[in-house]
Image (cartoon, rainbow, N blue to C red):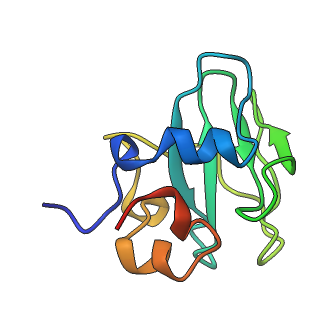
């Protein structure tokens, strides 16, 4: 088993309970800033990044774009996939990183 959190591990019911509904056909995954390791969640059906694990109303669209990391201020590079099998290791979230983040609640222990 990989040390990285897989998208199928995300508890959708808990995401919805906390206000994570987006457009009705949500597909969630986690990724991190490759510079400072701040964790984010993306709903990749409509390219929406959830910026704050404590407040799911804080989000931004990343359709054909990127955003500046709230942790370090650097732009998240969008020249490589952030999620999925082709995502670089720099973007993958380990269980330890998840446990230290505001997103720890989204994957059952």
Could one spot residue 16 in this view of the protein? yes
Q: Please identify the quarter of the rendering in which residue 76 is found.
A: bottom right
Residue at image location 53% in from the left, 39% down from the top = 13
The vertical placement of 2 against 14, above or below, is below
* Quarter placement of the C terminus: bottom left
Residue at image location 82% in from the left, 69% down from the top = 70
- Foreground residue among 85 and 15: 15
Expressed as whole percent of the image width and height from the top left, the position of residue 35 reads: 62, 75
Expressed as whole percent of the image width and height from the top left, the position of residue 93 reads: 44, 65
* Quarter placement of the N terminus: bottom left
Expressed as whole percent of the image width and height from the top left, the position of residue 107 reads: 43, 58
Residue at image location 38% in from the left, 40% down from the top = 84
Residue at image location 77% in from the left, 56% down from the top = 51
Q: Is residue 79 left or right of residue 99?
A: right
The vertical placement of 72 against 56, above or below, is below
Q: Please identify the quarter of the rendering in which residue 15 is found.
A: top right
């Amino acid at each position: 088993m990989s040390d990285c959190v897989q998208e199928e591990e995300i508890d959708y019911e808990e995401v919805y309970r906390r206000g994570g509904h987006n457009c009705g056909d949500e597909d969630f995954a986690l990724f991190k800033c490759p510079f400072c390791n701040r964790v984010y969640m993306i709903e990749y059906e409509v390219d929406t990044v959830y910026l704050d694990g404590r407040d799911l109303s804080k989000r931004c669209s990343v359709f054909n774009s990127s955003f500046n990391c709230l942790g370090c201020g650097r732009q998240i590079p969008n020249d490589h996939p952030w999620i999925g099998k082709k995502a670089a290791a720099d973007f993958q979230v380990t269980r330890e990183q998840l446990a230290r983040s505001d997103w720890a609640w989204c994957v059952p222990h």
